[in-house]
Amino acid sequence: MDTTFLKGLRMLQALSLSDRPRGVTELARELGLTKSNSHRLLKTLVHAGYAQNNSETAKYSATLKVWELGSHVLSKVDVKSAASAYLQPLADKTGESVHLSLLVENAVVYIDKIDSAQPVRAYSQIGKGAPAYCVATGKALLAFQGEDAIARVSEKLEVHTSRTITEPEEFKREMGRVRQLGYAINRGEWREGVCGVGAPIRDVSGQVVAAVGISGPESRMKSTFMREQAPIVIQTADLISKALGYPGGAVAYRKTA
């Protein structure tokens, strides 16, 4: 085992986790190293670009290169893998089917799901999808794609049910509500009698890259029920976002829908 390499990793970890610059003596004492050994390791980290030295204070701190390295790793974390631990608990808490969705052009594609244990439930298939503008996870994704993307979608709003939003200005207002509330609702706009709640999932950069939601028959998914379940869906989206490296949370939940 290369003990020098391991000592270097420990030094890098100590700098990365510290909330302030550190001196050689302090680091040596913390890591159980000699001062000369610590100094050599720090010089190597500086040379490699992972640490920087303040010539005035003679103290060291980690550079953004450490953050960049971590970001590259986090960017490779698969959304489906990151979400896997949180879908079943969402289904258990709400009693409804759960979907994990990605946006592909103007449609959502379901990449994972948990079926409700109820005898009457929403039907879907992994790998299949729906128009993003009329399902909850699709709305949750579209609302954060920018005004140009929303404008393009609003030009092609086809009717699927009597509740499908087809007026561009109304759709834009709907997108504004989703951003304000932090979640989206489908009121039977894609399939008659099937409703849902969806919330956005963010990656390490804060970009919305996926959405998670619940869906079920309108007989159970009343407006009051959907508003009550919204915080649970948002919490699940937040947990998945954190698993993808996003440090923040979703927009604060508001009861007005």
Image (tube, helix red, strand yellow):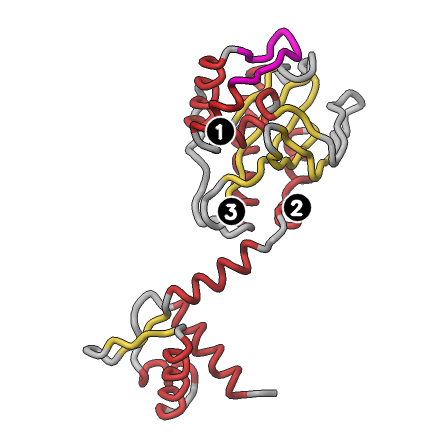
Instruction: Give residue 120's position: percent from left, percent from top.
Output: 78, 20
Residue type marked 3: Asp
Instruction: Give residue 198's position: percent from left, percent from top.
Output: 57, 29
Instruction: Give residue 52's position: percent from left, percent from top.
Output: 32, 74
Instruction: Give residue 257's position: percent from left, percent from top.
Output: 47, 18
Classed neighbour count for the residue bearing mark 3: other residues with Cα under 10 Å, few (<14), some (14–19), many (≥20): many
Using the numbered discs, state the Cα–Cα distance from disc 1 to disc 2 in whole angstroms. Answer: 25 Å
Q: Main secondary structure of the magenta part?
A: loop
Viewer-proximal residue among 185 and 92:
185
Residue type marked 1: Ala
Q: Is residue 159 magenta?
A: yes
| x 55%, y 60%: residue | 73
| x 60%, y 32%: residue | 105
Q: Which residues are magenta?
A: 155-166
Helix, strand or loop for disc 2: helix
For mark 2, what is the residue? 80
Q: State which tag comes first along the sequence, 3 or 2.
A: 2
For mark 1, what is the residue? 149
Viewer-proximal residue among 157 and 23:
157
Classed neighbour count for the residue bearing mark 1: other residues with Cα under 10 Å, few (<14), some (14–19), many (≥20): some
CB atoms at circles 1 and 2 under 8 Å apart? no
Q: State which tag comes first along the sequence, 1 or 2.
A: 2
- Is residue 257 in view? no
- Is residue 252 in view? yes
Using the numbered discs, state the Cα–Cα distance from disc 3 to disc 2 in whole angstroms. Answer: 12 Å
For mark 3, what is the residue? 203
Answer with the quarter of the image where residue 206 lies: top left
Q: Is residue 113 above or below residue 135?
A: below
| x 44%, y 17%: residue | 173
Helix, strand or loop for disc 1: helix
